[in-house]
Image (cartoon, rainbow, N blue to C red):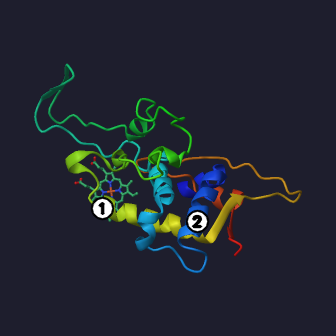
Amino acid sequence: MASMLAFVFYPSAQKRAQAELDRVVGRGRLPTFEDQPLLPYVSAVCRELLRWHVIVPLSIAHSPTKDDIYDRMFIPKGTPMLMNAWAILHGPEVYPASDPEGFKPERFLTTEGALNDDDVQGAFGLRRRSCVRLHFANSMLWIMVASVLATFDVTKTKDGRGNEIPVDVNDSDGFVSHPLRSIVPFAQEVVKRKS
Ligand code: HEM
């Protein structure tokens, strides 16, 4: 869902990823995992999706098994603790160069155009208890994004006069965050790309 919003709001990122796909894969087949090393911008789009719209914004609650002190704060055993993944992944200290709220896949690329070392680990929790299926989830996200971009243009819907209908962003409440489903069929168009 967040990918559809990102493609609508940031058409230049969508076009740049499609240009990379056209150059590496061509228009005669779908991308596969063998193509992945040659598609750093598409991979950067996936990282930016995980960062820009954090799926589990407060991660999962954990609690210490014994009393602890952290940074001069006393934390009693059993205190529920949440990691603010949204704040970490939008922190201007970590993403200073360019607008942490904006969708900028190039923040994950080196000046030579290769992927940098920031693998957005925080989106999957940190350290010992992080997501056990993060590699599977990353692969599924990548193949979905690569396939959609290879096949479709995602744009704003136009009204009867040809004016774009503004997309209103509403996110779900709760443990898992996603754009609300109702906006998708009404304000976005997913059109098969012209060959
Ligand atoms: C983009 C997709 C996904 C995201 C963003 C995500 C994110 C997370 C996060 C933030 C946690 C909590 C880590 C913590 O406790 O600090 C977690 C835990 C977990 N995730 Fe995922 N996850 C994703 C996909 C999946 C999938 C596809 C599976 C299974 C097929 C999965 C299975 C689990 C399990 C079993 C845990 C609990 C791990 C534990 O407590 O030891 N996740 N995930």
Which quadrant is home to the N terminus? bottom right
**Relative to the observer, which residue lies in front, 82 or 14?**
14
Name the front one of labels 2 and 1: 2
Image quadrant in which you'd find residue 17:
bottom right
Q: Which three-letter amino acid code belongs to the residue tagged 2?
A: Leu
Identify the mark nearer the N-term, 2 or 1: 1
Q: Residue at x 19, y 19 (%)?
A: 72
Q: Residue at x 37, y 62 (%)?
A: 137
> What residue does disc 1 label?
133
x, y (%) of residue 14? 61, 57
Q: Does residue 173 appear in the picture of this structure?
A: no
Asked if the residues shown at circle 2 and circle 1 are in contact, with their CB atoms under 8 angstroms apart, the answer is: no
Q: Secondary structure at mark 1?
A: loop
> Which element carries disc 2, helix, strand or loop?
helix
Question: Horizontal placement of 84 versus 81: left or right?
Answer: right
Report which residue position mark 2 lands on. Answer: 149
Res 93 visible: yes
Residue plotted at (65% across, 55% down): 183
User: Which amino acid, mark 1?
Assistant: Arg
Residue 71, quarter of picture = top left
Taking the image in four quarters, ligand 1 sits in the one at bottom left
Q: Residue furthest top?
A: 72
Indicate yes or no: mark 1 CB to ligand 1 under 8 Å.
yes
